[in-house]
Every structure is written in C-alpha cells, then in structure tokens.
Image (spheres, helix red, strand yellow):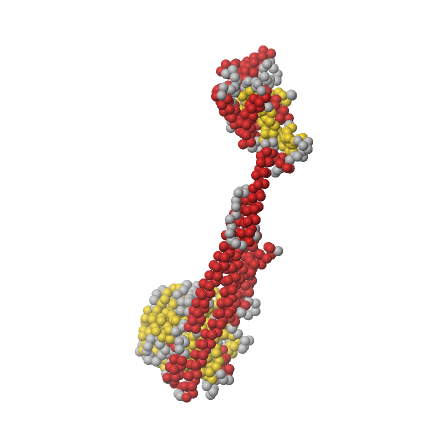
C-alpha cells in the first residue's frame, strides 16, 4: 500500500509538471479553436511550379512555410532577422524563378502601430538568410501605410534581375537585385508620381505599372506615361506582373481578375469573383481572403473556414484544395499528447523506482516536507493565478477597453449622423473620438454599407473596397447582420498586426460604423499587472515556503540529533546521551532513549565481562570455522570436516622445575608469547598441553607457515630475555601438516571442549620427534611447502611413518642465526648430497655430508644422513629413507 501511494503521489507531481511545461501545446491540441484564434497569415504567394509560400504569425513568431501543390510542407522555419512577429510585420512575399524568397517587412511597435523601418529581405531556397537588399527608415502608422506614406511596391522579375519599388512622398524609386549575387539592391530609376498609388509593381527595369485610387491604371517609364482604360467601378487592390508582357489586376470591389497586355494596353476579363473554382466545395474566386497570381498565371488563394487556413491553387476556372492549415479527421497532435503522457508515466516510474530501490522508500523529513510544501504552494498559486486572478483581471481591463472603444464609436456615429461623412477622415469628430479613447492604441474607423462595401475609411482605403479583403484585417461581413439589428457588436480577433478589437455600431440607415484598435497595449498592460501580481504571489509563496521549512527544520534538527544518537548506539557507543530540548514529543522520545541507553550500558558491561570469560575457553575463530555466530549455539552437534592445515608446537625446558608453581609459570610464559601469533594469522588454537599446543588453519597453508616463522622469532626473543635473567633457553619446535581434518565439540551436557581428529595430526606429532633429533625447528610436509615458497627452506627427504612415506621440508627461516647461516651457506651442497643419497650414490653422499657436518655439528639432518650413507656404502640399501641414527 505504501508503494502504491508513493507512486500515485509521484505520478501526480510529474503529470502536473508536464502540464505546466506543455500547457500551450495540450490546450492547442485539445481545443484547436483556441490556437487558431492566435494565428494569422500575413502574406501569400505562389511560384511558377505551383508551390505555395506563406508567412504564418503563430506563437509570437513569423513562420516561413513552403508547400507543394500536393500539400506536402517542405519548408517551415522562423526566418532570421524578421522572426519576431511582435516587432516585424511581413507585408509581402515573392519567390523568384531561381527559388530565392523575397520578403518585405516593416519593423513596428504593436501597441502604437508606429512603423520605424522598412526592409526587403532575401532568403535562400532552404529559408536561410541571404541578404537585406534594402533597408529604409520611416515614421508612420503601419496599417495606414498601405494606402499612403513610404512603402514597398510588389516584386517582379526577369531572367537576370529581381525588381521592386519604393514609394516615397511623390516619387517611386525602382531597385534591382541581380540574381545569384545577393548584393544590396541597386537603384535603377526614379519616377515622379504625385498621388499615393493603390498598387504598384515594376515591369522590367525601365517602367512601373501603377494602379491609381480612382481605378485608373498607368504604365510609367522615364519619358512616357500610358493610361489603360479599365471597366468602370474597378477598385485596384493588387497588381501582378505576367511573364509574357502582361499584368494581372485584382478588383477589390467585385473581386474580379483582369489581364492587361502591356504592348497593346488591351484589357480582358480573366475571371469573375463569382466564378466557382471548386464545385465540390462550392468555393468561388471571391471567397478567398487573400489571392496571388504568379507570372505564369497560376492562382493561389487563401480561405479561412471554420477556424482553418485552407490553400487552393490552379487556374481561373478550376482550383484544388491542396492543404488545410489544420487537417480534418484525426488530429495527429493527439499522438504528441499521448507521448507526453507516456513520457510522464515513464519518468514517474523511474523516480519511483529510484525512491523504492535506491532510497529504500526513505527520504529525509526536511526533504519530503520541503517537496510537499513547495509543490502545494506552487500548485495553489498557479491555480489561483491561472483560473481566478488572471481571468478576472483580463475581464476587468478588457471591459474598460471595450467601454472606451464604444465611447469613441458613439462620438463618431453621432458626428456622422449629424454632419458630412468626410469627418471620418479629417473632421473634429475623429479627434474627439481619439481623445475619448484616452490611452487606447490608434483607432481605425470604417463606414461600411449593408452589403459589406467600404464607404469611408480613416486608413485611406478606396470606396467600394470589399471589407472581407482589407489588408491586415479580418473579414467583417459576417458581423454586419448582427450589428444591423442594433446595439454594439464586439469582436476580439488576431490579425497580422496582432490582437485587435472591433466595435460595430449601426447608424440606423443601413450603414455600419466599425471602430478598431490594437489590443496589444491592453495585453501588455494585463501582462504587466499579472506579472506584478505573480511577483507578489511568488514572493509571498517563497516566504510561506521558507517559514514552513524553518518550522520543519527545527523539528528535523531535533530528530537528527536523536538519529545521531541512535546511529551511535547502533555502532556500539552506549555512552551517548541525547540532548534535545524541543519541548514536544521528540524531547519525550529523547528522554526514553536516554533511559534505554543507561539500561543497555549496564547490561552490556555485564555481557562483556561474561563474553571475555567465555572466549578464554572457546576462541572466536573456532566458532567461525564451526559456522556458529554465538557461543550459545555451540554443542555436540557443532562439527566440521574439511581440508585444513595443522600446526603442532612443542617446547621443552633445559632445566627441570622444582615445583608445580614454577612449572606452570614457565609453561604460561611461553604459551602467552607464542599462542597469540597463531590468532594473528587467522589460526585457531584448540588444544593446550603442558609441552605445546595444536592449532588449525582453515583458509590456506601460507598463514600457517607465516605463523610458524613468527613463533620461532618470538621464541628467539623470549630466549634472549631469559638469558638476560640467567635462565636457560626454551626449545620450541614446530611441525606443519595439511589434509582432511574433523574439528568439533566433544563432551557431555555439563562440560565440553574442542577437539580434532585426523591422521594429519598423528603425522605431525610423529614428525615432531624426528625434527627435534634432526635440529629442524620448523618442519612441514611437501603439501604445506607449496604455501611457504617465499621462505628459506631445504628438502630433507622421505620419512617413513608407520608404513606411510612423508616428504619432509626444513623451513630454516626461524632457526637460530648461526644454524640459519650454516644451512643457507651449504644449501646447494646439501641438496646435491640428498640427491646422491636417493640415487644410491652413497659414497658421494657421505663425502658431501661429512663436509657439511665438519662445518657445523648442529646440522642434525646432515649428521644422520652421513652415518647412514657410510653404513649403506658398504652394505647397500634398496629403498633409502631419512631416519634418526641411534
């Protein structure tokens, strides 16, 4: 249950964090309408291959998107230098025959709508920035600049160059960029033109096509000007250059498209705005929000329908729906949400696994409390800010903004009803309306007929302009019927120039007044207020967290003190005292702890005294070998059978003791010096005798050999001390043998002791006497010698013991120094003599042994061999062995 609860808590925390990080994406996917309301397509074009390019303002970024005529997106990125949509408004886009992407942009402030700079930017086919072809400063409203002021013309091309113009206060400057060079645009010509053109585009490098506000079309060169007669009532919305000496004209009133031949000035109707171009979907040419015609006559149209951006391409009679900005049917972004959920579950599992496995479901109190406090406070403040404070503040400030717009609209409506319509643009009513709006962003007034045709505009758009296709505006026709019923209609929307609010008011005579203003300043104000509230709540929350953590820390400090005391007791320190004065349950617990430790100390002292007494009789190593952990577990059933090394130690005193007291004193004196050496080398002494003891080593023979050498060193040191007191030396001999040993406990219920049973022990005991009569202080069998190769030694030979042949090794590293040096000096000669002996070359052996004995009579092995070699040299011997010569 504890594991399940911990997993649920971790999962909830991780899920909350995932939602906090991906809330915008999740909201966009689950509520597509909310995301679409913050998107706008600011520019559209199509190249001669039918690829559609457009700039999408989304999430505060300008996204440059390229899509082929099958709807496959091959380009989607935020372009360098103009990517921030809150600072740059993309006004036009053009794709040349060599796939260079030319983008016209205006640097502006969204709140004031003031434009500070115009730039013509060139990008490579993959969207990488190539060059800023032209950059000019300006100081004007970015919306009204479309009908006056300084602005770029449309872009055209020929085989060598890309052309564009700059209208600047009564003149049109023509610029060209050579394809493939990516240099700054060069000025080719300048044309005087008094009135601001409705639309303009270069036609090659020597002339421009100008659409006038009166519906007149002119072709202007340096020394000539030709007028083109268009049908009456045409409102020129856009001009595109054709590739065969033609131009395409878009009528912004009827939404018709005309084709003009530049050589003959002939005008022909290319398509009616009412012409159905997609019968399956019932789409006509006039339904498109934006339209673009390439030089080869390919038409691209943008349709906004049900919150979706839909793109059509084709000709004047038939167009295909190539792609929708938001695909219908299954939303693939759902897979993204599923991926986020799966990732959150996996992360929760990893954290939970670490919590359960690594931390063993244990976490410091201060950490656990701190996490819970921080998560709780953050969640509380987030919910409070997101669902209560922020919506309330947004609602209050938005209402204030609506009231100001409504007041401005009422003033303007009253002025229009009472006076001439020209006041919309120039009269005092507009000024009064501006003053009534206080610090609201610049206001835009449009007087619209009931059929959606523009009557008057403060931004200078021509009369009869269809209000559904006004640049940088939303289609307004959908709201006119509701406004005509009376009252004010408020529309909040998102346009290429940012968030905007409209107030539509009926004048009662079939005319509708539209008042629009950017809400960027309101949103900035809302964001500023919310940021201040967020800062205040963050500081308040941080203070609350710190206070709660300090309270928990005070409790945790007392608990940590108590834990340190508990850890000390666990480590065997029972003298510890918990000093806690928290005045709560922890202090009471500390008092109980101190009482407990006093009781433990008393019992441990008693137990320690008892254990010391026990271990005098039963070594700890013995319990380890027998596989028991405490002395209480020892019994007659405690035994083990294994391969072990047996060490037999025998000592003799040169003088006889006169009393039992003196005898035991001497025995204990020797035993106390040499027995601990066994234990230091992981051996176990199990049988003490008056003239020595037996020990076993269960790990390896090397420990036994090392112990034997150290015993001899202790014996030599003891003899030196005895000599200084005028006492005779003690003779200590050691034999080591290895084999299968049975070690266990024997006795009755009242008295038991350790004992070992093995032929190995009998062999060692038999070798002790042979070693003493051979001046061997440390003897061992061949099997033991494998673990003692690092010591000075010599091969003695084969010893016969009760029909058993044993190979005896003399380890003389612990011999008295004179004898050690003698054996070391004659080691090679001794080995040669032994080899002669066992090869039955008794005369040669006798000779060599005789030389060794002459050097030292204390070399008992050589002495015994010499006698038997002399005997065998005359009588012979078929199976020679090493024996003691009596």
Residue that sits furthest to the top in the current view: 874
Residue that sits furthest to the right in the current view: 748
Q: State the image coordinates of residue 329 (x, y, percent, origin top left).
A: 57, 69
Let me know if residue 762 appears in the view.
yes
Q: Is 207 left, or right, of 843 in this rendering? A: left
Of residues 642 and 34, the one nearer the viewer is 642
Let me know if residue 153 appears in the view.
no
| Quadrant in the picture for the N terminus | bottom right
Q: Quadrant of residue 689?
A: top right
Q: State the image coordinates of residue 663 (x, y, percent, origin top left).
A: 57, 22
Of residues 57 and 763, the one nearer the viewer is 763
Q: Quadrant of residue 293?
A: bottom left
Above or below 662: residue 195: below
Of residues 641 and 129, the one nearer the viewer is 641
| Quadrant in the picture for the C terminus | top right
Residue at 61% from the left image edge and 29% from the top image edge: 686
Residue at 54% from the left image edge and 21% from the top image edge: 731
Above or below 850: residue 576: below
Q: Is 33 left, or right, of 208 in this rendering? A: right
Q: Is 447 left, or right, of 572 in this rendering? A: left
Above or below 716: residue 591: below
Q: State the image coordinates of residue 883 (x, y, percent, origin top left).
A: 59, 17
Of residues 741 and 255, the one nearer the viewer is 741
Q: State the image coordinates of residue 521 (x, y, percent, origin top left).
A: 42, 72
Q: How many marks?
A: 0
Residue at 47% from the left image edge and 72% from the top image edge: 394
Above or below 513: residue 690: above
């Amino acid at each position: 249950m504890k594991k399940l609860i911990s997993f649920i808590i971790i999962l909830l925390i991780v899920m909350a964090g995932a939602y906090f990080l991906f809330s915008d994406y999740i909201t966009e996917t689950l509520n597509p309408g909310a995301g679409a309301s913050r998107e706008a397509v600011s520019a559209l074009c199509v190249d001669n291959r039918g690829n559609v390019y457009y700039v999408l303002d989304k999430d505060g970024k300008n996204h440059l998107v390229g899509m082929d005529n099958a709807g496959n997106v091959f380009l989607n990125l935020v372009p360098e230098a103009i990517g921030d949509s809150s600072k740059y408004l993309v006004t036009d886009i053009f794709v040349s025959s060599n796939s260079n992407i030319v983008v016209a942009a205006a640097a502006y402030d969204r709140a004031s709508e003031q434009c500070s700079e115009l730039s013509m930017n060139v990008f490579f086919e993959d969207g990488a920035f190539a060059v800023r072809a032209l950059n000019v400063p300006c100081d004007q409203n970015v919306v009204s600049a479309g009908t006056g002021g300084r602005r770029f013309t449309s872009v055209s091309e020929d085989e060598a160059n890309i052309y564009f113009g700059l209208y600047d206060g009564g003149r049109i400057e023509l610029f060209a960029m050579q394809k493939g060079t990516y240099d700054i645009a060069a000025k080719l010509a300048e044309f005087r033109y008094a009135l601001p053109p409705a639309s303009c585009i270069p036609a090659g490098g020597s002339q421009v096509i100008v659409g006038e506000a009166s519906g007149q079309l002119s072709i202007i060169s340096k020394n000539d000007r030709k007028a083109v007669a268009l049908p009456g009532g045409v409102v020129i919305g856009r001009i595109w250059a054709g590739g065969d000496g033609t131009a395409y004209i878009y009528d912004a009133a009827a939404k018709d498209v005309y084709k003009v031949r530049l050589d003959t000035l002939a005008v022909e109707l290319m398509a009616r705005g009412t012409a159905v171009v997609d019968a399956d979907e019932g789409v006509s040419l006039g339904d498109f929000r934006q339209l673009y015609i390439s030089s080869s006559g390919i038409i691209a149209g943008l349709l906004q329908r049900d919150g979706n951006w839909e793109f059509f391409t084709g000709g004047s009679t038939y167009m295909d729906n190539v792609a929708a900005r938001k695909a219908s049917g299954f939303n693939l972004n759902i897979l993204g949400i599923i991926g986020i959920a799966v990732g959150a579950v996996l992360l929760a599992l990893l954290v939970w696994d670490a919590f359960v496995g690594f931390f063993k479901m244990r976490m410091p109190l201060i950490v656990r409390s701190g996490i819970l406090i921080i998560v709780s406070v953050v969640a509380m403040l987030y919910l409070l800010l997101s669902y209560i404070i922020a919506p309330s503040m947004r609602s209050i400030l938005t209402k204030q903004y609506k009231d100001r717009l409504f007041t401005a609209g009422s003033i303007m409506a009253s002025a229009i009803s009472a006076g001439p319509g020209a006041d919309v643009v120039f009269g005092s009513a507009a000024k009064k309306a501006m003053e009534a709006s206080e610090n609201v962003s610049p206001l835009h007034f449009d007087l619209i007929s009931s059929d959606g045709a523009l009557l008057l505009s403060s931004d200078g758009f021509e009369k009869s302009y269809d209000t559904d296709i006004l640049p940088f505006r939303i289609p307004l026709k959908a709201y006119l019927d509701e406004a005509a019923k009376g009252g004010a209609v408020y529309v909040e929307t998102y346009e290429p120039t940012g968030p905007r609010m409209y107030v539509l008011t009926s004048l009662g005579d079939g005319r509708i007044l539209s008042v629009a203003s950017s809400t960027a300043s309101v949103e900035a104000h809302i964001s500023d207020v919310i940021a201040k509230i967020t800062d205040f709540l963050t500081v308040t929350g941080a203070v609350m967290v710190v206070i709660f953590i300090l309270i928990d820390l005070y409790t945790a400090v007392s608990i940590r003190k108590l834990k340190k005391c508990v850890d000390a007791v666990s480590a065997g320190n029972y003298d510890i005292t918990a000093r806690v004065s928290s005045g709560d349950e922890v202090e009471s617990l500390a008092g109980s702890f101190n009482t407990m430790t006093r009781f433990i100390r008393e019992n441990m002292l008693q137990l320690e005294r008892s254990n010391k007494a026990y271990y005098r009789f039963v070594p700890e190593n013995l319990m380890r070998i027998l596989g028991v952990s405490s002395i209480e577990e020892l019994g007659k059933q405690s035994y083990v059978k294994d391969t072990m090394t047996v060490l037999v130690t025998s000592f003799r005193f040169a003088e006889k003791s006169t009393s039992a007291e003196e005898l035991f004193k001497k025995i204990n004196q020797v035993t106390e010096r040499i027995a601990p050496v066994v234990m230091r080398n992981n051996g176990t002494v199990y049988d003490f005798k008056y003239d020595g003891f037996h020990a076993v080593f269960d790990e390896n023979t090397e420990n036994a050999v090392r112990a034997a050498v150290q015993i001899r060193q202790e014996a030599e040191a003891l003899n030196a001390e005895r000599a200084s007191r005028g006492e005779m030396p003690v003779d200590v001999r050691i034999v080591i043998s290895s084999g299968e040993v049975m070690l266990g406990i024997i006795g009755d219920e009242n008295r038991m002791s350790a004992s070992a049973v093995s032929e190995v022990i009998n062999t060692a005991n038999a070798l002790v006497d042979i070693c003493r009569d051979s001046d061997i202080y440390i003897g061992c069998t061949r099997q033991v010698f494998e673990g003692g190769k690092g010591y000075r030694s010599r091969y003695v030979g084969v010893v016969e013991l009760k029909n058993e042949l044993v190979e005896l090794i003399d380890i003389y590293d612990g011999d008295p120094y004179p004898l050690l040096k003698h054996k070391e000096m004659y080691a090679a000669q001794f080995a040669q003599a032994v080899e002669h002996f066992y090869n039955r070359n008794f005369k040669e052996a006798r000779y060599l042994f005789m030389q060794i004995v002459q050097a030292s009579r204390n070399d008992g092995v050589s002495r015994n061999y010499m006698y038997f070699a002399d005997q065998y040299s005359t009588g012979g011997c078929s199976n020679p062995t090493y024996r003691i010569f009596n």
